[in-house]
C-alpha cells in the first residue's frame, strides 16, 4: 500500500503531464479536448492539495476548474 507521500508524488507528476498535454492540445486548437485534459489535471492537483493539506493549491485549482467548466458550458 503506497504512503500518502508516494501517492501525492505520483499524482502530481501525472496531473502535470496531463496539463502539459492540455497546453499542447490548445496550441494545436484541439478543442474541447484541451479543456478536458486541463480539467483532469486541475482535479489531480486539487487532490494533491488535499493530500498535502495545502489550501493555496486547493483554492487555485478550484478557481481554475470553475473557470474551465464555465467556459465549457458557455461554448455548448
Image: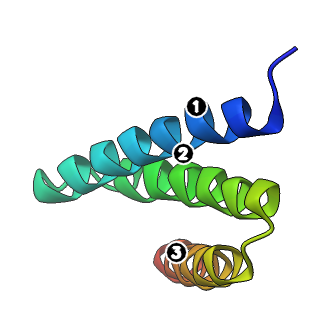
Left or right: residue 20 versus residue 66 is left
Question: Where is residue 26 drawn, in percent x and y?
Answer: 22, 58
Residue under the point 65% across and 57% down: 43
Q: What element carries label 1?
A: helix
Q: Which of marks 2 and 3 is in front?
A: 2
* Residue density around tag 2, few if under 14, some if 14–19, many if 20 or more, within 10 Å: some
Identify the colour scheme used.
Answer: rainbow
Q: Are marks 2 and 1 in contact (CB under 8 Å)?
A: yes
Q: Nearer the viewer, mark 3 or mark 1?
A: 1
- Of residues 43 and 37, which is closer to you in this image? 43
Question: Where is residue 71 drawn, in percent x and y?
Answer: 49, 80
Residue 18 lies in quadrant: top left
Ranked by sequence position, the earlier of labels 3 and 1 is 1
Q: How far apart are marks 2 and 1 (CA)?
A: 6 Å
Residue under the point 68% across and 78% down: 62
Residue under the point 58% across and 82% down: 60
Question: Where is residue 3 drawn, in percent x and y?
Answer: 82, 28
Residue position for label 2: 12
**Which quadrant of the figure contains the N terminus?**
top right
* Residue density around tag 3, few if under 14, some if 14–19, many if 20 or more, within 10 Å: some
Q: Do the residues labelled 2 and 3 touch (CB within 8 Å)?
A: no
Q: Is mark 2 on a helix, strand or loop?
A: helix
Q: Is mark 3 on a helix, strand or loop?
A: helix
Residue position for label 1: 10
- Of residues 67 and 15, which is closer to you in this image? 15
Residue position for label 3: 68
Amino acid at each position: 500500500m503506497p504512503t500518502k507521500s508516494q501517492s501525492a508524488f505520483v499524482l502530481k507528476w501525472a496531473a502535470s503531464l496531463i496539463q502539459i498535454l492540455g497546453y499542447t492540445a490548445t496550441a494545436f486548437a484541439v478543442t474541447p479536448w484541451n479543456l478536458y485534459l486541463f480539467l483532469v489535471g486541475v482535479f489531480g492537483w486539487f487532490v494533491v492539495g488535499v493530500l498535502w493539506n495545502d489550501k493555496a493549491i486547493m483554492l487555485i485549482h478550484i478557481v481554475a476548474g470553475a473557470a474551465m467548466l464555465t467556459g465549457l458550458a458557455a461554448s455548448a
